[in-house]
């Protein structure tokens, strides 16, 4: 009987310890909060990288459009296609 009382008291003590660990300021809650903060920081870093990639892509697209316009001007100057009358078959 004494052994069962000790085991019951031991189980009750362990339950109290778990309850304290799981409270908002307990170790488990603190661990989850730390993990959440780490994940948030990593997510922010990824977003910043994507923003930089988007910005570089936009600049590259603008440069491509400028180059394409210049090539069209050069092609028209070389071939004289810009001087031809437009096709009025429509």
Image: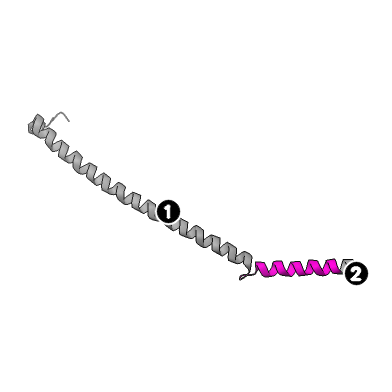
Question: Is any atom of residue 85 visible in this view?
Answer: no
Residue that mark 2 sits on: 2
Observer-nearest residue: 86 or 21?
21
Q: Residue at x 77, y 70 (%)?
A: 13
Count of number-bearing discs = 2
Give me the residue at 43% from left, 58% from top.
44
In this rendering, the answer to whether 59 lies above or below 28 is above
Q: Position of residue 69 (x, y in %)?
A: 17, 40
Q: Position of residue 35 (x, y in %)?
A: 55, 60
Q: Which region of the structure is painted magenta?
A: 6-24
13 drawn magenta = yes
User: Gap between marks 1 and 2, in whole Å?
Assistant: 59 Å
Residue assigned mark 1? 46
Q: In terms of depth relative to the viewer, which is nearer, 11 or 77?
A: 11
Outermost residue, right side: 1
Residue 14, relative to residue 62: is it above or below?
A: below
Mark before the other along the chain sequence, 1 or 2? 2
Where is the N terminus found, in terms of image quarters? bottom right
Q: Residue at x 27, y 44 (%)?
A: 61
């Amino acid at each position: 009987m004494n052994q069962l009382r000790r085991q019951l008291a031991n189980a009750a003590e362990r339950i109290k310890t778990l309850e304290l660990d799981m409270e908002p300021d307990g170790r488990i809650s603190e661990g989850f909060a730390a993990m959440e903060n780490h994940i948030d920081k990593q997510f922010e870093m990824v977003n910043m990288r994507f923003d930089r990639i988007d910005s570089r892509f936009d600049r590259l697209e603008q440069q491509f459009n400028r180059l394409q316009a210049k090539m069209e001007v050069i092609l028209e100057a070389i071939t004289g296609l810009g001087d031809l009358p437009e096709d009025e078959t429509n």
